[in-house]
Amino acid sequence: MPTFTIDGKKIDAKDGTTVLQAALANGIFIPHYCWHPLLSISGNCRICLVEIEGRPKLEVSCNLAVAEGMVVRTNSDVVVAARKDVMEFLLINHPLDCPICDQAGECLLQDYHFKYSKRGSRFKEEKVHKAKVVDIGPNVKMDQERCILCSRCVRFCAEIAKDSELTIAQRGDSCYVTTAPGKRLENPYSLNTVDVCPVGALTSKDFRFKKRVWFLKQVPSVCPHCSNGCPIWIEYEDGVIYRWRPRSEDVIREKYIAPSQMGITNFLCDEGRLSYKEWQLASRIFEPLVSSEEGFKNIGAIEALRLVKNAIANSAETVGVISAQSSCEEADAFIKFFKSVYRTKREPKAASEDDIIIKRDKNPNANYLKSLNIENLPADVTGDVLVIVDTLPEDDMMKVVNFKWKLVVQLTHDRSLIVPGADIVLPLATFTEKEGTLVNHAGVRQSFSKVFEPKGGTRNLVEWVELLKK
């Protein structure tokens, strides 16, 4: 374990640790563009240059292993001058797009310019112009003029997504990132290239021109789209969600954490990232509904609860069906209240999966329900009152719709999935309107936070159960 000195501070580091990694791990920030803790080392941006005592030239810290007795300076006059030169070089052909660029406010090129350069351009010649607003895939647009050729996106596709869809073409100042011949950027993780891009070269079609990032507030949460449970930031303003982002990407930007500690959940699949739209559907239910000859009509919560309570009180057997979309706390409350409880889960047809992140099980809490030894809904289920949380997949639907229940109660947030034969519908708060915990496929229990207060007459499942108890 070599001991070396950096900016006067003695540091012990493991063999093979780079100067950049050791510095970041010990609170000494060295600017970097091309380096990323989960990608291979490229060493092409040169902004991480440092001075090594006894060596004639500056060296890139991202590709330099620490050695016993090494003395490193990250802020000497020669290093500061070199950073300014690197920044000037990177900005020579960069367009003045900041006022209209979606990356404004979270752009390392902007941040480093103000922190390490502040030098006006001396370049008087015509800039090299490249293609703008290039459609390179279903989710991403490319602006080749803004690209600083850090190659993060190229390495991400090859090393994480396992599909070399991006490449660098041409030579010299004519180089540009583009799709490989005959390919488009359409792997299931394409939007992560927007996250790893340190400038505004890659932008999300879904987010482009929707909101300036400095207006957004963020709440830590967990992606509920499948059983992997990736940590995310939910970003919103004025009651509207604008995007989900991998939560640990911000940790990567601020300090070094070893890849072995971080794991692959530092990225998000496109499906999960864009699933935020499911919680802002126009088909939301905001008040209790009762079935009538004319269809469902609004009914007050007091009357709805009275009808359900009376039915349960006069029932020889009430059957509850809890969904794996529910949190651990909601499942616990539901199971304690209802004697006969079965589990169900959403099972979309042709569910996607791979060996990277995406799991076939599209339920965030199936593992927890399984640990409670709750059985799957049997084919011969009978009773007087049926209480369904969320909705039912087609197979489970057929088990209950043909049975003559005295009352069918459903708790859901979406009018378009209402189960055939439902008599009363109680409006559930959405995932973003509640807090709790989920247990992913690996048995890891994670917390998610409330983004908004429940709207209208919606409540989370725990609150509905408490009202039924009274």
Image (spheres, helix red, strand yellow):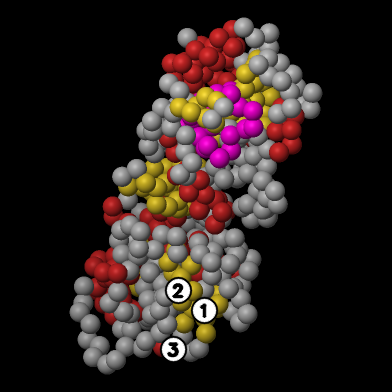
Furthest residue to the right?
A: 380
Q: Amino acid at mark 3?
A: Ser
Residue 30 in sight:
no
- The residues bearing labels 2 and 3 have C-alpha atoms spaced at a distance of 16 Å
Residue closer to the observer: 278 or 149: 278
Question: To which residue does mark 2 refer?
Answer: 142
Residues at circles 2 and 1 in contact by the CB criterion of under 8 Å: yes
x and y percent of residue 293 in the render?
A: 57, 27
Residue at the image point whose x is 46% and y is 76% from the top: 134
Q: Does 58 appear above or below 101?
A: below
Q: Does 78 appear above or below 317?
A: below
Q: Amino acid at mark 2?
A: Met
Q: Does 203 appear above or below 276?
A: below
Which of discs 1 and 3 lies nearer the camera? The answer is 1
- The residues bearing labels 2 and 1 have C-alpha atoms spaced at a distance of 8 Å
Q: Amino acid at mark 1?
A: Thr
Secondary structure beneath dot 1 equals strand
First-in-chain label (2 vs 1): 2
Secondary structure beneath dot 2 equals strand
343 horizontally vs 47: left or right: right
- The residues bearing labels 1 and 3 have C-alpha atoms spaced at a distance of 12 Å
Bounds of the magenta span?
409-429
x and y percent of residue 77 in the render?
A: 24, 74
Question: To which residue does mark 1 refer?
Answer: 178
Which of discs 2 and 3 lies nearer the camera? The answer is 2
Question: To which residue does mark 3 refer?
Answer: 174
Residue at the image point whose x is 74% and y is 19% from the top: 382
Residue 161 in sight:
yes
Judge the density around disc 1: few (<14), some (14-19), many (≥20) Cα neighbours within 10 Å. Answer: many
First-in-chain label (2 vs 3): 2
Secondary structure beneath dot 3 equals helix
The picture quadrant where one finds residue 22 is bottom left
